[in-house]
Structures are given as C-alpha cells and as structure tokens.
Amino acid sequence: MSIDVKVPVLPESVTDATVATWYKKPGDFVKRDENLVDLETDKVVLEVPAPADGVLESIAVESGDVVEANQVLGVVKEGEIPEEKAEESVAPKAPTGAKENADMGTSSKASSSEASSSKGDVDTGSAGPAARKMMHENNIDASQVSGSGRGGRITKPDVQNVANTPMEERVPMSRLRMKIADRMVEAQSTAAMLTSFNEVDLKAVMDIRKKYKEEFINKHGIKLGLMSFFVKAATEALKQFPIINASVEGEDIVYHRQQNIGIAVATERGLVVPVLKNTDAMGLADIDGAIRDFAVAGNAGKLTMDDLTGGTFTITNGGTFGSLMSTPILNMPQSAILGMHTIKERPVVVDGEIVVRPMMYLALTYDHRIIDGKDAVQFLVVLKNMLEDPARMLLNL
C-alpha cells in the first residue's frame, strides 16, 4: 500500500515552510519514524518522519520549494525491508547529493593537483606576492597581464581583470534570517527605542562562582554560570518595575504577571531567543541547565515553537564575542531588552581607594512609548545593586 508523506500541521502563526534537506531519495528503503526530510519555518526546523517501513517511492517537492500544511511531499510504498537492507536504512545518511559533492570534491582535488603541476611554469614577471599567488591559481602568464602598478608592476586587481574572478556571491536568505530581518525592521519602525547605560562591578558574583564552583558542579552536574545571576537579578528588578515587563497592544498596555525571560543564543542558522518560563520559580541550577539545553537544541535545530514563544523580556550577551558596549534592538512585541558586555578589569574608586575590579557595561534598550527614562534608569540601578551584592536576591531586598 502506498502512503502519502505530508507536511505536518504547522505551528501557530506559521503559514508555510521551505523544504530544506531530503535524507532519502526515491528507491531508498526507509524505517517507520525515520527522518525523511527537514522543513525550515520562520523559527524552527521540522523533521518529517516516514509513516511506515518500506521504500520511498517518489518525491513530489525538491529542496528550496515552499510548502503548506498537509501538502504531499512524497510517497512511501509500505512493505517489509530485506534483512540485509534493514541496518543500512537506519544508519545515519548524509543529505541526498552529498556523495555526488564528495565525488566532485575528489575530482576537483585531482584537477587541482594536475593544474598545480602545470602552473609551476607560469611566468609571473614583476607581480607582487598576492598577484603571483592568483596568477598561479588561475594559470595566467605575465604576458597576459598589463601591469598598472609603479614601473608596470602587476597588481592583484590586474590579475583579477584577466581572470574575471567573481568578487561577490549571491545566495538567498534562509527563512530564519528573513524573519530576523523583518523583526529588526519592525522594531525600528514601530517602537520609540532609547538606550540607557550603567556599569556593574562583578567581583561579588565572580567570588561566589569561584568559591562554590566544585560544590555546585558536584551537586547539580552543571557549571555555575554568569547568566543565571543576571536572570535572577533581572527577575527581581522586573517585579519592582512591572512596566519594563509589559508590552503594547494597539492602544493598550499589557502587564505580564509572570517573568518569562528570553536568552539570545547564536546558532549556525542565526540568532534565536528561547524563553525561560516563570524565572521567579527557578533556581540558579535550573536556569543554567535550561540555557545549556537551549544551546544544544538550537545548534541541532531542535528548538520547538513553545521554546521560542511567550517571552516578556530578553537578555543578550554580546560580551561572549568581545563587545564592550552596544545598543541592542527590541525583541518585539517586548518593550525592553538588556545587553550584557565583555568583562574588563578596570581601576575604580571604592571607599576612597583605587582598586582593580571586573567591570561590565550594561545597556537597557526600551520602548519610550510606555517606559519613562526614570523607570529605565532605576531598573538598571536595582539590577546593578543586586549583582554587586547578590545577598539582596536571596533576602528579597
């Protein structure tokens, strides 16, 4: 019996998907629930499993095609898999076309090897180092190039003109990248964004992490991270300033009674913001564990729509890439986002003494339509005080 392989029901607010990668080709044996194809939506990658044991009879759409819910992707002919093929069918496979690419790569290497042997005779004349390299790569002789440098010296652009080497590459944006672009433009054109700054001395936090490092790992099985302190401090500050945790809907202000904090995570597919739900009820170990799981799932393309929705506030840490200061863009429809930055040891004055402390600049971008500068500044001050004296979080001060 032949069974249609269909696009699953898409998450709420997602109208279509793009066929990303087929892992089987017509004629291949498949096992029930084995992933046949990946579909890329605005936010997540969906796996489409085989509906039964059998053979992939046909494919109705190709990689890059846009499909809708319940659309037929292909057909599986149900049947028993020969014993000698069973193990092969469930073994991890590269996307279709990978073998061809590998073969092409081998051929390319061979051609490159042959070419390099013939390029040894290239006369590079008065070419500079970069130009000589390109002349050898493209088998271009000095007699073919008109040097524009001083004294007729051959430059790299001269060789490029002869080789007609493409200087740019055009590739389509992924669905995720297009969604990110749309959200960024929406934030810029909709909200009245303003950014306030402060700085925080992280010595107390760093001392706690150092003191309890081994004990924390032994008990919870995870490293005590920096982000968990910021999440807990932000949670307490949001409780004191609920307008920072609110959002705009039409002419209404919606106050969210639960603190759902999104953590910006950079993945190979782009930036995603999975959400920690009800952070007021989470401990440091819970937060660190959830962030670790989000990072693993994000890089594997396994984040769900539930992971990515429901946020009321966002934290982004540009410091992991070395950023000293930035003005983060709102994650709409949220009204505020906190930017963390790199930690730098700097001289500061404490109790009249100049001391060296691990300092970080904080940036709070907020929607000035509903958040006044006074609230934004005081929110940052509360956050700073809690991080500089973490006991405040424990004592609810």
Image (cartoon, helix red, strand yellow):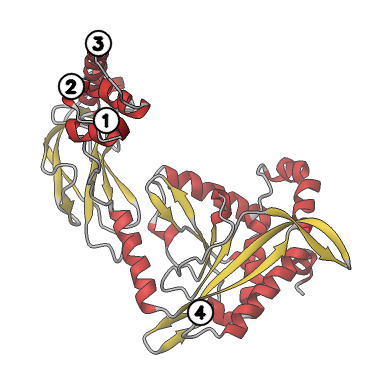
Badge 1: residue crowd in 10 Å (few <14, some 14–19, many ≥20): few
The nearer-to-camera label among 3 and 1 is 1
In front: 196, or 267?
196
Vertical position of residue 43 compared to residue 337: above or below: above
Q: Earlier in the sequence, mark 3 or mark 2?
A: 3
Q: Decide: marks 3, 2 in contact (CB < 8 A)?
A: no
Q: Residue at x 18, y 42 (%)?
A: 63
User: Residue 143 bears which disc, if any?
Assistant: 2
Identified by mark 4, the residue type is: Ala
Q: Earlier in the sequence, mark 2 or mark 4?
A: 2
User: Residue 121 bears which disc, if any?
Assistant: 3
Identified by mark 3, the residue type is: Asp
Identified by mark 1, the residue type is: Gly
Q: CA distance from mark 3 to mark 1?
A: 21 Å
Q: Which residue is mark 1?
A: 152
User: Residue 246 bears which disc, if any?
Assistant: 4
The nearer-to-camera label among 4 and 3 is 3
Q: Decide: marks 1, 2 in contact (CB < 8 A)?
A: no
Q: Decide: marks 3, 1 in contact (CB < 8 A)?
A: no
Q: Earlier in the sequence, mark 3 or mark 1?
A: 3
Q: Residue at x 22, y 24 (%)?
A: 138
